[in-house]
Image (tube, rainbow, N blue to C red):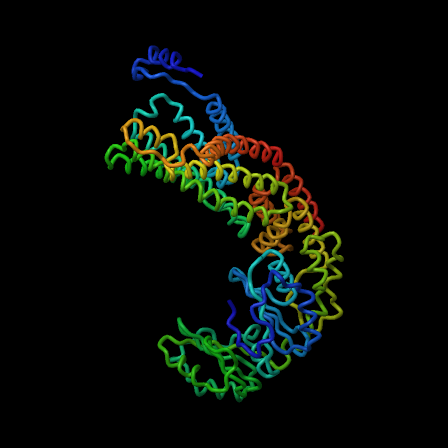
Amino acid sequence: MFLLPKGKPLVENFPIAKLQLPEALDKLKNGKLTGCAIFDFPASDCALIYEEGKLISVLMRRNKIEEKDADALRALVDQIILTDSGSFNVYGFTKDVNQAVLALIRGVKVLDRQELKLIDFKNLRERIKNERMTATLKISTDQSVGMILYRDGETVGFFDDTADAIENSPAKVQQIATLPGATVDLMAIRGADGVNQDLSAQVNIRSLWAAAKGDVFAAPEPANIFQPQAVVAPQPSPVTANSAEVETAIIAIANASLGKLGKTLVDKELLNAGGIKALKDESKLRNFLNAVEKSSILLASANKIKEMRNAISLEVEKL
Amino acid sequence: MDFTSFFQYLTTIIPFLPKIYNPVVYNASDLVLIFFWFVAAVISFYFSYGNARLWTSVSIGFFLIFWGQAYLLNPYASSYFRVTAVHTIIGAVSILLISHGFQEYFLFTKTLDITGSKRTIYLTTIGAIVLGIIFVSLNPKPSLFVLRNYRMAENTVWLFLSIVNIFVVLKIYHEIKGSPIANGILSFVLVFFFIVIWKGSELYLQMYQWDPAWQTLVEEFDFNIQSEGIDGAMVKIATTMSSAGAMLSGLSVVGTFAYLFKLVR
């Protein structure tokens, strides 16, 4: 589970099973949220960072694998469809704190689990100040976590895992820093990192939602789901429109052959294979098909699986 | 149906078999029931062949039910108390295996991972039965009272695990809804419902000492105990439900596996 600072609670512990994602995200957008929306699933978490209603960053973490932005949004839609339990929380932040939280989830790791006793902490704070870092300094022990939030080198708040809100006093974080075995992480972003993009304009959540709800064939072409002209910041997605079309077609085939678990199964095995493009490699394609077939025997007949396998192979040839 | 002469003939051609002195009479319904469980065991074994290991658990479970039921037809069943006690334990192991199979199925729907080997299932089953044998051997020879207690414990395990299995199967169905096999899996709800009726009503009769085994003990040991309410309508209803539940559960298992075959062909 993510440990993100808690700001002003706007929505707390709303059951995900009752959530209509497109409507919920529209509300956050129209309400010009500056803050974060957190989805807590039993085995995964997703955080959405908003800046004045613009969805500037998405991070999905499941099975120790992290997905970002458009991929994370797609994974989020899948998780909501497939999971009955979990909660949805929204917290509002000031712009300064919001930027520090953004650094926490997508910043560059300047320090990675450095032992606190080996660090000149005073020098580190001076460095943050002199380099005008927008960053989160995380101090962790086995039992506790504390955070110091910075905007342009200035401290904008403190948070620890027992707090209900951002605090102005460093007392608790200082206390954690004195505990034996404390380590330090520092995540920082440069001035405009990720601020200019609005993922909600780039990803058609309604189409993804409709497709994931089972109406795969009614969904617009995946090439239209992503609108490259709207991309301002560089996107991590290496998938071309053609690859996305093939991927959607494979998911549709699996869905038609195996029911709703077909989509999850293909997503999972594609992740294991290293993405849709990896299927160009014959051995990886074979492994992918074998893995899908292995699980499918609990869902469909041998003939149906054979048909699905052939149909998927034909789709992959289009790559 | 009188099978006395058949078994007496068997003792003449198989010399080491103990002689049969008492009449061996079976109800036609018992024989039909055993036949159903036999068919269910054969079909479920065939179904598990080449399939995931969770079906191995389920099929061994159903096979052991057949085994336990068939054992009761054996004319020596009431002569070897330790063996009878072991078979009661085997009955409990069978529902544990079936439940394990369905829980693995539920896990699969959540993780889409199929792990573990069939060999583990076979070895664990053998291990559980061997443990049962050791347990029975280390303890005094069970009396008729103790055997009845064994059966009560077995029925309790069956009743509660069958109720749990109904919920697990419904959960599985919810997860795999839309897949070709979904309705076949849902049919197991019916199977476990009939098992709940069968074992639940049997347990109910045992708890109030209305079961035939208790009545036999009262007669045999000349107890001056009258089970209050034994002539009541509830006893007749529970007895009928137990027999009907046993028959329908066997029949529904056969039907469910036949349906699953149709779906996966």
Q: Residue B137's spot in the image, x, y percent?
A: 26, 34
**Is residue B88 in sight in this rendering?**
yes
Would residue A86 be found to the left or right of residue A119 on screen? right
Snapshot quadrant of residue B68: top left
Q: Is residue B64 above or below residue A44?
A: above
Would residue A266 be found to the left or right of residue B233 on screen? right
Q: Residue B84's spot in the image, x, y percent?
A: 33, 30
**Is residue B60 in sight in this rendering?**
no
- Viewer-proximal residue among B138 and A209: B138
Q: Is residue B241 above or below residue A185?
A: above
**Total count of labels:** 0
**Which quadrant does the N terminus of chain B fall into?**
top left
**Which quadrant does the C terminus of chain B fall into?**
top right
Q: Residue at x 58, y 49 (%)?
A: B175
- Viewer-proximal residue among B48 and A11: A11
Would residue B209 be found to the left or right of residue A239 on screen? left
Q: Residue at x 47, y 23 (%)?
A: B31
- Viewer-proximal residue among B139 and A60: B139
Q: Residue A300's spot in the image, x, y percent?
A: 61, 41
Would residue B175 be found to the left or right of residue A313 on screen? left
Q: Residue A87's spot in the image, x, y percent?
A: 56, 65
